[in-house]
Amino acid sequence: GWLAITPYAVHKLRESKTESTKEGKEAKVQTHALLNWVNFGLTVGGLYAIWKNKENTAAKKGEIAKHLVSRHGKSGFMSACLATAAMVVAIFKTQTSKGQPWRNKLHRALGASSYLVAGVSMAIMVNGPWGKRSLGENGQKAF
């Protein structure tokens, strides 16, 4: 969800800059926020599913699950932390600022960093052992 929905959310924000009415601008900014809340929910749900799957797989083998030890796990977690920080900044600015609180360089930098780190995390996964096992060499080359 994150890599698919985020560009659309950013697009809505960019569209708001060309909107001539205050209501139109606010509607597009609110759409941006809503899409990012959906992204956040998908991210939390995905992390929970991955965590539980790792727990269940380890339990079947009589082992203790090791979380966030791979480069993919660490970069995915970092992406989620950056996304959370971007949302916290956006919420704080929206609640405490007057005018156009969504024009915030820190929020933009955190959001962009989260998106880029998520892409790196996916590339690590596809080009790592999981990709080789699940996609094969030809599948890995497609990415």
Image (cartoon, helix red, strand yellow):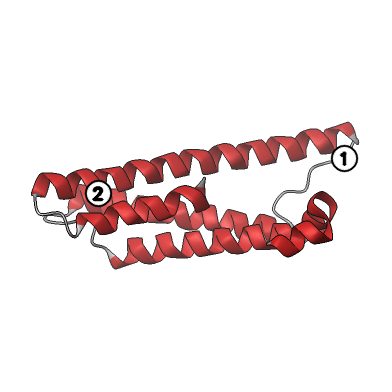
Rendered location of residue 6, percent (x, y): 43, 52
The residue at which mark 1 appears reads as 63
Quadrant position of the C terminus in the picture: bottom right
Q: Residue furthest left?
A: 21
Identify residue type, mark 1: Glu
Q: Residues within 10 Å of mark 2 (few under 14, many from 20)?
A: many
Identify residue type, mark 2: Val
Q: Are marks 1 and 2 in contact (CB under 8 Å)?
A: no
Rendered location of residue 62, percent (x, y): 90, 35
Q: Mark 1 or mark 2: which comes first in sequence?
A: 2
The residue at which mark 2 appears reads as 29
In the rendered view, does 134 fall on the left or right side of 29? right
What SS does tag 2 mark?
Answer: helix
- Tell me the mark number nearer the camera, choosing from 1 and 2: 2
Judging depth in this view, the residue of 34 and 79 nearest the camera is 34
The residue drawn where x is 56% and y is 58% is 118
| Quarter location, residue 38 | top left
Seen in the picture, residue 104 relative to 1 is either above or below; the reply is below
Rendered location of residue 91, percent (x, y): 29, 48
In the rendered view, does 128 fall on the left or right side of 93? right
